[in-house]
Amino acid sequence: MAEHILQAHDLVMKFGRKCVLDRISMQLERGEILAIVGGSGSGKSTLMRQLALLQTPTSGSIELFGERVLEMSEFRTLPLRRRMGVMFQNGALFGDLTVLENISMPLREHTSISLETIEQIAMLKLALAGLEPEAAALFPSQLSGGMRKRAAVARGIAMDPEILFLDEPGSGLDPVSADAMDDLVLHLKRTLGLTVVLVTHDMDSLWRVADRIVLLADTRIAAEGTLQEVLESGHAAAHKFFHGRRGRVVGATYDQ
């Protein structure tokens, strides 16, 4: 039986009078890669931030590892937050810190282990993210787009999280680098046993890495399930998203 390590019930998010998410209910199964997809402005990143406890919804509830977290104080949620890692769309690396210092930051803030051990762990995460040791001494401004993404992933896994949130990991990358990022996501899932929540609009990523998909449209979940189930859902938003020209081309490639 699948273990639901994260569940959202009737999430609503409003900014003033504008409703971005309306009664969103979903669950995350341990060990899966769940992709949150939808058109621009559909609330994908907003939903991810709420699931990662980075933003509080207007109403609704979230159960994380069996705990109803929105009813808890921020202090009481800290042990649960440490079981999650996040990679933001632009990397969100500190520009005045080296890559090694960026990766080390969560360990320095949330543990009492020695600096030497922290640096050893950070170098291990650097390697797991596919970066060469020489990258540790570089600053974010000296990195390519793909290297910045990998450095951000390395920081996201620094605390050995059970859930890793990735916001548009392939955004802004060339096709080769985007493919390599997909490979990295699959590699981390296999080697670390991670559960991954992936926000993306990249059709190739959906076909290659997603176990299950949540499609957002008009503030609601329009379709949910495996890629095949979403394709066969009959919802107009699913047809528009997956059967447009780009979706047909990518789908035909993977069907071959």
Image: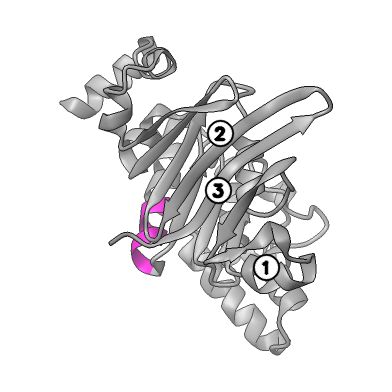
Question: Which of pointers 2 and 1 lies earlier in the amino acid sequence?
Answer: 1
Question: Would residue 186 appear left or right of 73 to someone viewing this image?
Answer: left
* Mark 2, residue position: 171
* Mark 1, residue position: 100
Q: Secondary structure at mark 1?
A: helix
Which residue appears at 43% of the width and 31% of the height? 175
Which residue appears at 73% of the width and 47% of the height? 55
Amino acid type, callout 2: Ser
Q: Secondary structure at mark 3?
A: strand
For the C terminus, give its image quadrant. top left
Front tag of 3 and 1:
3
Specify whether residue 7 is painted magenta.
no
**What is the magenta segment's predominant secondary structure?**
helix
Which residue appears at 59% of the width and 66% of the height? 67
Which region of the structure is painted magenta? 184-191
Q: Tag on residue 8?
A: 3
